[in-house]
Image (cartoon, rainbow, N blue to C red):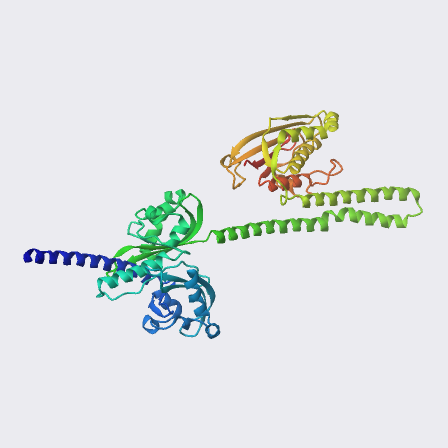
Amino acid sequence: MMEKVEKKIPDDSEGLRKAYLELKASEERYHKMIDEVQDYAIILLDEKGNVLNWNKGAEKIKLYTSKEIIGQNFSLFYLPEDQKTGLPTQLITEAALKGKAIHEGWRVRKDGTHFWGSTTITALHGENDQIIGFSKVTRDLTEKKLSDDQLRSSSEELKRKNEELKLSEERYHQMIAEVQDYAIVLLNEEGNVQNWNAGAEFIKGYTADEIIGKNFRIFYTKEDREDKLPDRLLNNAIETGKAVQEGWRVRKDGTRFWGSIVITALHNKSGKLIGFSKVTRDLTKKKEADDKLLQYTAELEAKNYELEQFAYIASHDLQEPLRKIQTFTEILRKNIHDENSVNKYFDKITTSAQRMAEMIKSVLNYSRLTKDGSEFTAVDLNIIVANVKTDFELLIEEKKAKIISDPLPVIKGIPLQLTQLFTNLVSNALKFTNTNPSIVIHSKTVTKEEVISNISLSGDSKYLLLTFSDNGIGFEQQYANKIFSMFQRLHGKQEYAGTGIGLALCKRIVENHNGYITATSELGKGSIFYVYLPLN
């Protein structure tokens, strides 16, 4: 009986030794993941805020070595006035009560210089939910070098007991698991997920059971996977130590978020690659704010261009009738007793004043064209064509004109502005013709790829193409862009009436609908106007 017992002892010892080695290897991987991160100061504090461990990032940012700082209280990094007001104590108290505390402010390095630190302090809990310490993650934002949060655990003595290793591993697991602002993931050499913290679940939507063992490529868009982006990032991390990238990522539910990612290659003591740490931060709100700023800047530039046009109009086009009025007034003053001259120049002054009033009215109409505050509703383009024909009924009859239109669709738009668009294009075709005007309105659906080559459209993939063809006098193609500018006329106002702003109004209306307008023509052979409107 004693012999059987003695044989079991070596077997049990071997199992214990294997368990010990496995736990030891697991701890080494976690230690390496934290130790090799240099972009973040990741510190473990005890319940009172005393430093228990110190990573390379902490030494790089705060300039203390681990021997100089371990055992010191973390309040050492704060300004004297912050220490006086008790800010460090307030932060760990808040973390203990609420789970975490976030703060930004000036911090002090070992050499006395200051840096602007963004700090997250997270409370760590034991099995009975008691506070067992805090993790403190600091980023140096002085030069706006945004990185992501890498956490580290201190190196434990390799000769600790099995129970001490378990406790150490539990603390590291808790520190990583309870951080919610960053997705902190450990990958193996092939990029397969090996652990999953609360931040990863919050940002990406997967639970640990759903994702552990799967490849991290699942977080990337189809386009990025086809472009081999995940593989290139791992290769960059292997070659240079880390890979930094921003781009759209995919959550479990298929929605996208803008992620800022840092992948760090992890090595064992012999320098062999043992995996990767991957830290992801959700910057969707920042991305949206940046995009809005870009859009606002583009709109501001467009408005500045319009202001330049208005300034040109005020200094040039509007000056013409004003100069005439001044000239005729001077002539009248010299010939005030000549009744024929008085009548003649009064008529000229009246004509110039009317011309100026028309131009001012046109500028006001142009400036009022906006999509801001205008409600997009369903608009039946067939009704608009019918209304335009009714409006021009007398002119059509007088000129013996023909207006032929395809059956047109119902689209989303601003009714009044679309009516103005059709009115101006038809009016333009009726005006610039000699005899028997013929206007043909065609429509078809096109994709961005089918749009003529000199037009660049973004957004919607399908567009309604409306073509307005006429048999009028036409124009030389080199003036195709000039005709859409305000008061740009290719023909004298003595030949054809108008202010020269009708096509500028058309361009503004189409742009308000996120579309595009252009024209082709040949002198004496009519014109074709192309209107592209997005289909919702």
Quarter holding residue 107: bottom left
In the rendered image, the residue lying farthest to the front is 1
**Number of disc labels:** 0
Q: Is residue 24 left or right of residue 497?
A: left
Q: Is residue 389 visible?
A: yes
Give percent across and percent down for residue 479: 63, 39
Residue at (32, 47) in percent of width and height: 209
Q: Nearer the viewer, residue 491 or 470?
A: 470
Residue at (94, 47) in percent of width and height: 337
Q: Is residue 471 left or right of residue 360?
A: left
Q: Is residue 173 left or right of residue 259?
A: left
Quarter holding residue 67: bottom left
Give percent across and percent down for residue 6: 8, 58
Q: Is residue 22 left or right of residue 424?
A: left
Q: Nearer the viewer, residue 401 or 413?
A: 413
**Which quarter of the rendering shows the N terminus?**
bottom left
Residue at (9, 57) in percent of width and height: 5
Q: Is residue 39 visible?
A: no
Give percent across and percent down for residue 316: 72, 49
**Which quarter of the rendering shows the C terminus?**
top right
Q: Nearer the viewer, residue 233 or 493?
A: 233
Residue at (49, 52) in percent of width and height: 285
Give percent across and percent down for residue 317: 72, 47
